[in-house]
Structures are given as C-alpha cells and as structure tokens.
Amino acid sequence: MDTKRLSLLLTASGAAAVGAVAFSLHTADNKARTVAQPGVAMAQSRAAVPDASKLKANEIGRIPIIMYHSVDERGGKYDKRGLNIPGTVFRKHLDMMVKAGWYPMNARDIYFPEKLQAVPAGMTPVVLTFDDARGSQFWMKPDGSIAPNCILGILENYHKKYGEKWPRAGTFFALPKSSYNPTPFWQAGLETKKCQWLVTNGYELSNHSFAHKNMGPMNAAQVREAVWGCVRDIRKLAPNATMDTFCVPYGSYPKDKSTWGIILNDPQGKYKNLVAFKAWGDESFAPGDKRFNPKEVDRIGVDPGYFEQVFARLEKAGKLYVSDGNPSTMTVPKSWQDFVSPNRPGKLPVVFYGQAVPTKAKPKIKPAPTTKKKNATTVAKTTKHP
C-alpha cells in the first residue's frame, strides 16, 4: 500500500484511539472493501504479500535474549551453569548467529519501535547480555587497547569482520563497587575509562542492582535502594549511561509482588526501567505481542550444550521475529493475528499475510442408541497458536 495514502488513512481515522480502525483494501479488480479489528489498525495489499511471504516476516515473533557471564575467566573453572564458558564456545555461538541472520541489538533498543523496526529485512534481532561487569568481559592491556580474547575484544572483532551485519551492540549489566563487589570490570583505576568507552561506542551499560543481593526477602525500601544504588554509582562513572533496563540478581524477584512496580518505576522519580530481565528462561515475547510482560522478560542461559539446543529449536520452529525491512509497518502472519497487542509500542499499522489458523468446527454428535441411557460428549480440540 502507498505509504502516503496509509498515513492519510491513519490521520483521518480519529476513532483509532477508542476502538477499531478500518483501512480500505484493494482487490485485484480495484474494488475496495473494509476490514476492521478492535484495537489494531490494519493495512494490507496484494503487492505486500509476496515479499512478506518470501522473507517469512513476523514482527511479533520471539526474540532471543542470551545471558552470558564470563569467558575463560582467570583462575575460574568452566561450570555446569554456564557462568564461565570457553572463548571458543562463545565464538561458536556468534558464528551460528551470523550464519542464521541474527542481528545484535542493545536490550533497551528492543522496546523503542524506531530501533526495532530498523532491523534489516529478513533478519532476526538478538540481544547479548553480560552480567556482573566481570574482568573477562572487558580487559584493557597496559597500552590501553582492548584485550582481543575478552568478550568485548571478540565482539569488536566480529563487528570489524562483518560490518553493519554485526553492529556494535551488547548490554552489560553492571555492579558498582561496594563492600560486596570489586570495581566494575575488575581493573581498579580503569573503571571510569571502561564505562565511558562502552557508552561512547554504542554498547549499553545498565543495572544489575547495587550489590547483587537476593531480592526475595526485600521490602519496598530495600528494593528501591537495590535498584537506585546501582544507577547512582554507575552514573558517577559514566553520566550518559542510560541505565534503564534492569537484571534481577539470581532471577529472584521479591516475594512481595506489590514491590515489583518499584523495580520499573521509582516512587521518588530518580530512575525508570523499561523492563526487568529474568535468568535462565526461554526466548522472550516481542513488545508487539500481547503476551509481553515488561516485569518478567526471559533470557536464555548458556550452560553447556543448552544454547545449541535452543538455537536448533528456534530455527526449526519458525517462531522467531523476522523484520519486514519497512519501518512504517508491522508485518505479521495471519496465523499470529490473535497475539497482536493493541498497546504495542508506536501503534504501527499491521500488515497481515498468509493464511489464518483455521477454526475447527465441533464434530457432529451422532444420536445415541435408544438402548443407552447416557450420551457421550464429544469435545472439539482447541486450536493451537504460536
């Protein structure tokens, strides 16, 4: 559909804020018909269908968010939980992602439509997260250069090798210096330089709490201090750090669920988080999927062999987010139409293509023989959705 015409339709439809929005859909003989769906502005044309089908575009598909900690940590042993993995394994993961057309993004950028919609056509956004600001994540040599075998050195090398197909991106969930933690990235005296380098060069520096304490037993005041303390101290090192995504220590949320809102929004207005991330989960829902919950966003762990299993499943299942390459529309298979959120960021018009999931009719029940006292009840199978 002509984008100028689509814009005029959107502008003219003042009812969009309160209900269904209708768009004219042209058939092959140019006869117009109207389709409406509550809360979802839809735009569709035959010309858009072949491209979307070829790309297998799905802009409410699952987004893999991967949780890393260390690679080849000095003095550390490789462990069954994947907290310290060989650098060769990390590079293997990156090679798999590059070959599959995954496109690295910072965690926060997933939740801004202008960022997410800028993913190149046919590619899948992926977020690499790194917890704790450990030494193996960012190590500087005596001459001030980045050690090539630390996580950042490896990422920089992939960016150099693949260019815009592998942009600079990665979210470092930091811990500030405290009686419980060493200085960020474990090289005393270089923490300011390192934090500012990350922010200046396009990486995300964000919040993993003040002291990595289990938040389970915390009350409201303690939850706030855990979140605010990290923002306060990391911004002393890097004033321009966004610090607006949060990683829950150990993935352990406060038992008192009434405090969960404090993780995202400070009652005193000092911080605001877009989302809170869990640990050791599955691939996450896209922000345009109505099942998305900003308080509990999944991440995929890298305990030995697990990422490879998840990767194979995701590539086979066909449920990943795939960009249509058009920043002005959100393209979704008709089989996913029930999961489009009316509160999706940006409220972009949705282009549906393909076949909807067929609704299975209940089978007819044959009359029971007169000799039987009871009829057998037949239950139709529930239609499966992605």
Image (cartoon, rainbow, N blue to C red):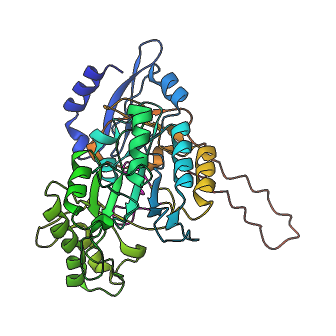
Residue 246, how many percent across, how many down? 30, 65
Q: Position of residue 166 (x, y in %)?
A: 41, 38
Q: Quarter-wise, where is residue 193 in the image? A: bottom left
Q: Is residue 290 visible?
A: no
What range of the chain is rendered magenta?
Answer: 285-299
Image point (45%, 61%), residue name? 68
Question: Which quadrant is home to the N terminus?
Answer: top left
Observer-nearest residue: 267 or 69? 69
Q: Residue furthest top?
A: 29
383 lies left or right of 320: right
Q: Is residue 290 magenta?
A: yes
* Residue beneath the point at 39% across and 30% down: 325
Q: Nearer the viewer, residue 194 or 206?
A: 194
Residue 300 is situated, as x and y percent measured from the top left of the image, at 50, 60
- Specify the quadrant of the image occupied by residue 207: bottom left
Query: Residue at the spot x=81%, y=74% of the render?
Result: 373
Quick one: 40 or 323, which is closer to the camera?
A: 323
